[in-house]
Amino acid sequence: MFIVMLGAPGTGKGTIGGILEKELGIVRISSGDIFRTYVKKDKEIGKKIEDYMSKGLLVPDELVVQLVGNRLQESDVINGAILDGFPRTENQAKELDKLLSKGNNKVNLAINLSLPDNEVIARISRRRCCPNKECGEIYNLDFKPPIRDGLCDKCGSKLVQRQDDKEETIKRRLEVYHSTADELINYYKNQNVLKNIKLGSETNLTSNDVGKVLVEELKATI
Ligand SMILES: [Zn+2]
């Protein structure tokens, strides 16, 4: 089963995708993780990606399709994957269909998470990360605070705020997200695979609640 996670940054795609991965045994592919891997291992491609990400801009289609395409050829995701952060545009969604059709696969479900922008900004600006490359644990001062103020629970490093989690960058990321979100959501709606889920103060649903409900629903269909 191939699942696409849609939604603005900070809507819980990572958390919910992580729950589905653990409970359903489907590997999660996050474009952010792929990019960060390249930033470390391939200086030339990495530098390009870093430039876009630090400005809150989208990595160009050609490059992102190539990197995700490479990842989708690996043996652990031949029969299914949860895609997080890709596709971001209708064009990327079409390219994804082409990539999947090579293995006679298609997107079976697109989960669209929505959360008001002001809540997104509040959430992300409260995020803190462990800068230790061996660790990389992520915290949230509201939902998942470290036990000791400002220090990583796992390795004791001093926590930092990532450049792309700062308020100005988040606002830019939201603008970029909204500029392509509708076409993407419509694309999956027209394919009858779209599932809309509202989070935050509107419904009082947390990412964990949504994850659990989805696991139960999907277990019945797998
Ligand atoms: Zn750490």
Image (cartoon, rainbow, N blue to C red):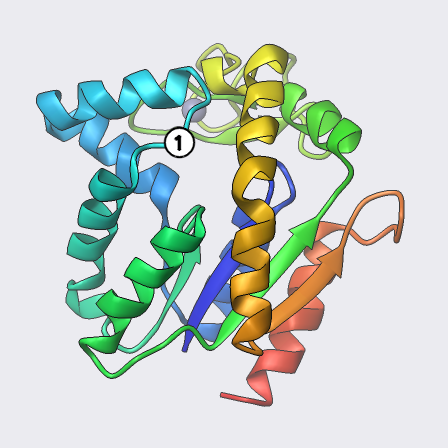
Q: Where does the image place residue 29, in percent across and percent down from the top left?
A: 35, 54
Q: Is residue 180 positioned above or below 24 on the image? A: above
Name the amino acid, label 1: Leu
Q: Is residue 142 visible?
A: no
Residue drawn at (53%, 67%) of the image: 188
| Ligand 1 position by quadrant | top left
Foreground of the two, 205 or 149 = 205
The quarter of the displayed image where residue 205 is located: bottom right
The quarter of the displayed image where residue 27 is located: bottom left
Residue drawn at (74%, 32%) of the image: 117
Residue drawn at (41%, 57%) of the image: 83
Residue 39 appears left or right of 176: left
Foreground of the two, 75 or 116 = 116
Q: Where does the image place residue 132, in percent across and percent down from the top left?
A: 35, 19
Foreground of the two, 157 or 2 = 2
Q: Is residue 168 positioned above or below 117 on the image? A: above
Residue drawn at (22%, 26%) of the image: 39
Q: Where does the image place residue 54, in percent across and percent down from the top left?
A: 40, 16
Q: Is residue 39 positioned above or below 11 on the image? A: above
Q: Secondary structure at mark 1?
A: loop
The quarter of the displayed image where residue 55 is located: top left
Q: Where does the image place residue 15, in percent across and percent down from the top left?
A: 57, 49
Q: How many other residues sit within 10 Å of disc 1, few (<14), some (14-19) or many (≥20)?
A: some
Residue of label 1 = 58
Residue 144 appears left or right of 180: right
